Amino acid sequence: MLLNRSFSKAGALLALGLLSPVGAMASTGSHNLRGDDLVGVSFWVVSMALVAATAFFFLEIQRVSPKWKTSLTVSGLVCLVAATHYFYMREVWVATGQTPTVFRYIDWLITVPLLMVEFFLILSAVTKVPAGVFWRLMVGTLVMLVAGYAGEAGKVGVWPAFIVGMAGWFYIINEIYRGEASKINAAGAPPAVQSAFRLMRGIVVFGWAVYPIGYAFGYLLGGDPKDSAAALNVVYNFADFLNKIAFGVIIWTAAVSESDKR
Ligand SMILES: *C/C=C(C)/C=C/C=C(C)/C=C/C1=C(C)CCCC1(C)C
């Protein structure tokens, strides 16, 4: 029995190492990831992408000029924090079939402010940026996330929470499209930074829209959140791929191109 179990463990490890993650998914224990569990597999795939992205951003720090190092450090941290949450969320999903909402919010509470800081950092690498830009982005982020969590956790009504959360998000969008951050970018940033800034704010509008839409499907449209849980998790997972990894790659592109200039 015991021997058997350690054999199957060794087999699983071997499969993991040699035959790619798909080998490990084939084993049948109730807490193992199954190959036909689309949600579980999407957690797995995005975890690995986040791990690779973390290593990439940290390694590339030595390649860029000093002003850009902090931006790459922050991109690496976003992916590291998210990867760690993804490992845990995959386990929760595989073991219980439940949506690990609370871990998503802890992840967001750490990573979304860091993503916001990136707007401030890429502009600061090329010009002077008043602290007000930083604080407005932070306030918008916190209002958005705290409201969303209060709604999902049942502390306040789902509608008021949604409306306040949307207001926070629009406040951020206003700052990067029409506010001071946008003006500083248009007036003082070199072309590579301007194009990164534009792509990043596009992500904040289109990539981020996935989350409030998910919230609406889960809570506002009258369906049972359990019915949409699987679909929502897959969508959130691939949205995070765009919103964390692609976001970092855009910053990396600007950092490399500005560093190579000198
Ligand atoms: C890496 C994770 C990211 C970029 C998460 C972003 C999350 C949001 C943009 C959430 C937005 C929400 C609203 C705009 C309304 C209220 C409900 C939320 C919190 C889902």
Image (cartoon, rainbow, N blue to C red):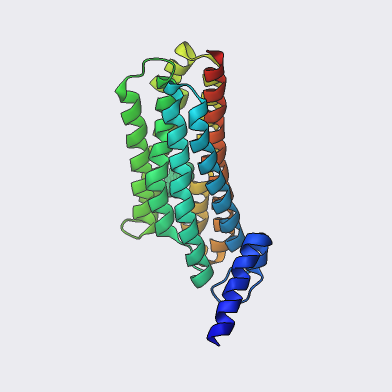
Is the residue 31 above or below the residue 256 in the image?
A: below
Q: Residue at x 56, y 18 (%)?
A: 260
**Residue at the outermost front position:** 3
In the shown orientation, is residue 214 left or right of residue 145? right
Q: Residue at x 46, y 18 (%)?
A: 185
Is the residue 219 above or below the residue 160 in the image?
A: below
Q: Nearer the viewer, residue 53 or 140?
A: 53
Q: Quadrant of residue 3?
A: bottom right
Is the residue 150 above or below the residue 256 in the image?
A: below
Q: Nearer the viewer, residue 68 or 134?
A: 68
**Residue at the outermost bottom position:** 1
Is the residue 2 above or below the residue 83 in the image?
A: below
Q: Residue at x 56, y 45 (%)?
A: 52
Q: Quadrant of residue 155?
A: bottom left
Q: Residue at x 37, y 46 (%)?
A: 109
Q: Identify the image quadrant of the N terminus.
A: bottom right
Would residue 163 be seen by someone viewing this image from the given angle? no
Q: Nearer the viewer, residue 249 or 177?
A: 249
In the shown orientation, is residue 193 left or right of residue 107? right
Q: Nearer the viewer, residue 148 or 133?
A: 133
Q: Position of residue 50 (x, y in %)?
A: 53, 47
Q: Position of residue 96 (x, y in %)?
A: 49, 71
Would residue 259 be seen by someone viewing this image from the given angle? yes
